[in-house]
Amino acid sequence: MAPAPDHNTVKAQLAKTRAALAGVGVSYAWLDAEILMAHVLHSSRERLHSHPERRLTAAQQQRLGRLTRRRADRVPVPYLTGEREFYGNLLAVRPGVLIPRPETELMVELAIAWLGEHPGPRRVIDLGTGSGAVAIAVAKAVPQARIVARDVSPRALRVADENIARFRLRRRITTERANLLRGAAPADLIVANLPYISAAQRKGRPRELSYEPALALDGGDDGLALIRQALRQAPAVLNPGGCLLLECDPSQARRLIRLARGEWPSAQVSVHKDLAGRDRVIRILL
């Protein structure tokens, strides 16, 4: 007689979690199941597959079940695990701060490239820093850069400070609570990942976005309300020969180019595509 199957193993619990998430329509249920399991076991996803026979304790099964139910309710995975990887850096993420997106890595790459072409002790403003993801990635790649990470949200800045301390970058990154560029000291490079979701997009947005702070997502009626303000403020802050990088929704790229040329008629304005081939970052070179 064959032995009864063991439902407490990693393999069995992974299958159960995948099925529960897929059953309520969660995209990439298999990936979310692996991330949640690895989090509960303080393990890597790779180790789950190399040791599928490992048994979970009753407490671990209960915790996995709670996390699975919250994910089924569309709570984003980074809020469940408290972490998100961005540009190779594992960052703390908490409710009340925007979850870093892979498409924002394009802005990091463009910032690093510009700083490499303009060596020296450059001053950078990371506008709408959130978790500090962009500031940290740039600071790690360009040791000479001195970065001011600005955000209007105290909750976001607390998370940014936590991450800056985690990577021992307090001497090179300072945080400021501020409304866009108001009162900012001159800078050579400004990187801005400001809210750009329009009213129409908010109506059809995924349920997961309802858990993220509206302050970090809501861009007004057409998605460009805060970006317009920043563009108007930037000429008084950006040094001659400087660079401004703006992340946007692909549908906004052409309008942003027109707005940028209205502020800087003689500037070089270009649009850059993310890995999905979509217009994602506007670069303004003075």
Image: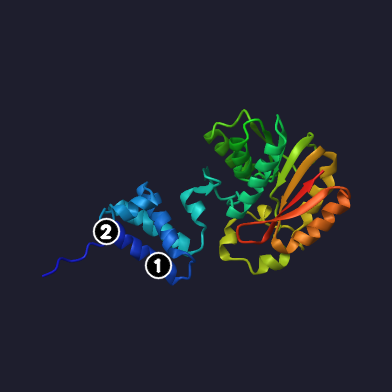
Residue beneath the point at 67% across and 37% down: 116
Q: How many marks?
A: 2
Q: Which quadrant of the figure contains the N terminus?
A: bottom left
- Label 2 sits on a secondary structure element that is loop
**Left or right position of 113 against 168:** right
Q: Give the quarter of the image for residue 252.
A: bottom right
Residue at the extreme front of the image, as rendered = 117
Q: Residues within 10 Å of mark 2 (few under 14, many from 20)?
A: some
Q: Position of residue 52 (x, y in %)?
A: 28, 56
- Residue where numbered disc 2 is placed: 8
Local SS, label 1: helix
Q: Give the camera-side residue of 47 and 278.
A: 278
State how far apart marks 1 and 2 are (Cα): 16 Å
* Residue with the mark numbered 1: 20
Residue 144 visible somewhere in the drawing: yes
In the picture, the quarter occupied by the C terminus is top right
Residue at 42% over, 54% down: 35
One can see residue 161 in this view: no
Asked whether, in this view, residue 285 is left or right of residue 203, the answer is: right
Query: Above or below — where is 13 with respect to 190?
Result: below
Position of residue 77 measured from the top left corner of the image (x, y, whole percent): 49, 56
Instruction: Report the amino acid beneath label 1.
Output: Ala
